[in-house]
Image (spheres, helix red, strand yellow):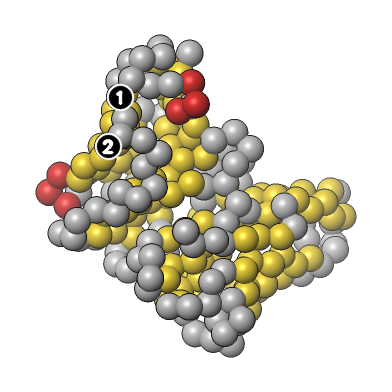
């Protein structure tokens, strides 16, 4: 199907290593979000891309986190020097426009830092 | 920071019971209010997106209302079934913050 695709689905990494998480949004969707869910917590906003506008990075928890979206399509979330507190499910969502349209979520990447 | 709050945090009901949850959000610069259902091992799926004060949406046994002036929305489930067991999330999109911010969710368990 043409849903939101995330890879990898699971990632186990050693503390201090860098990781890259990938999101392929639905074709034509201008909005792309990254969220994370830590154990027992709700969905925490990380970053938001909307069209060609500068991304809203206000939710990134530290400068170890960065994200880019190439060509208005695929997005990569990079976490440098991973820490155990980075362990979480990272969810990507895309939507056709601004907040009046529903967001479509990927299956998520479960990141475990050991 | 935009605070979206949901209550209760969790809820256990018997099959056939009707139930409701609350979502509160800042009313200023309101743009849209979303409801999602998140089942275990799946992705969140949209139930409703509401934009107008007084709006009511219905999908089968699930319905939602919206009050943008006072900043709250209710989600109702009539005659709960075990397959309704999930976490129900609301999210607010406001003109001031220009992004979709989620509440912590209400975890519903429906017991046969």
Q: Is B109 or B66 nearer to us in this picture? A: B66
How many badges with numbers are in the image? 2
Q: Quadrant of residue A40?
A: top right
Q: Residues within 10 Å of mark 1 (few under 14, many from 20)?
A: some
Where residue A15 sits in the image (x, y, percent)? 41, 14
**Residue displayed at 69% across by 67% down:** B22
**Residue displayed at 51% across by 47% down:** A43
The answer to whether residue A44 of the structure is visible from this angle is: yes
Q: Is B27 or A19 nearer to us in this picture? A: B27
Examine the rendered structure and indicate whether residue B59 appears above or below residue A70: below
Examine the rendered structure and indicate whether residue A86 appears above or below residue B54: above
Q: Residues within 10 Å of mark 2 (few under 14, many from 20)?
A: some
Where residue B102 sits in the image (x, y, percent)? 52, 56
The disc at residue A80 is 1
Q: Quadrant of residue A8?
A: top left
Horizontally, residue B81 falls left or right of residue B75, namely: right
**Residue displayed at 57% across by 56% down:** B103
> Which element is circle 2 on?
strand
Q: Gap in Å between the C-alphas at discs 1 and 2?
A: 8 Å
The answer to whether residue B61 of the structure is visible from this angle is: no
Q: Are marks 1 and 2 in contact (CB under 8 Å)?
A: yes
Where residue A72 sits in the image (x, y, percent)? 17, 52
Where residue B108 sits in the image (x, y, percent)? 73, 52
**Residue displayed at 30% across by 64% down:** A96
Residue tagged 2: A66
Q: Give the chain of mark 1.
A: A
Query: Outermost residue, bottom direction?
Result: B54
Q: Give the chain of mark 2.
A: A
N-terminal of the two: label 1 or label 2? 2
Examine the rendered structure and indicate whether residue B30 appears above or below residue B17: below
């Amino acid at each position: 199907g043409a849903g939101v695709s995330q890879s990898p689905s699971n990632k186990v990494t050693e503390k201090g290593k860098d990781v890259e998480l990938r999101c392929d949004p639905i074709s034509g969707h201008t909005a792309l979000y990254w969220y994370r869910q830590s154990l027992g917590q709700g969905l925490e906003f990380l970053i938001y891309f909307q069209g060609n506008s500068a991304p809203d990075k206000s939710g990134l928890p530290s400068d170890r986190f960065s994200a880019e979206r190439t060509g208005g399509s695929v997005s990569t979330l990079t976490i440098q020097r991973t820490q155990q507190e980075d362990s979480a499910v990272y969810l990507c969502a895309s939507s056709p426009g601004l907040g009046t349209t529903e967001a479509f979520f990927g299956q998520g990447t479960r990141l475990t830092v050991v | 920071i935009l605070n979206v709050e949901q209550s209760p945090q969790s809820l256990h009901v018997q099959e056939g019971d009707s139930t409701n949850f609350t979502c509160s959000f800042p009313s200023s610069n309101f743009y849209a209010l979303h409801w999602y259902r998140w089942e275990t091992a799946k992705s969140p799926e949209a139930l409703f997106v509401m934009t107008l004060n007084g709006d009511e949406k219905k999908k089968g046994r699930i319905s939602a209302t919206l009050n943008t002036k006072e900043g709250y929305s209710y989600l109702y489930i009539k005659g709960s079934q075990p397959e309704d067991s999930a976490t129900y999330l609301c999210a607010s999109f406001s003109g001031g913050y220009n992004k979709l911010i989620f509440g912590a969710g209400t975890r519903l368990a429906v017991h046969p």
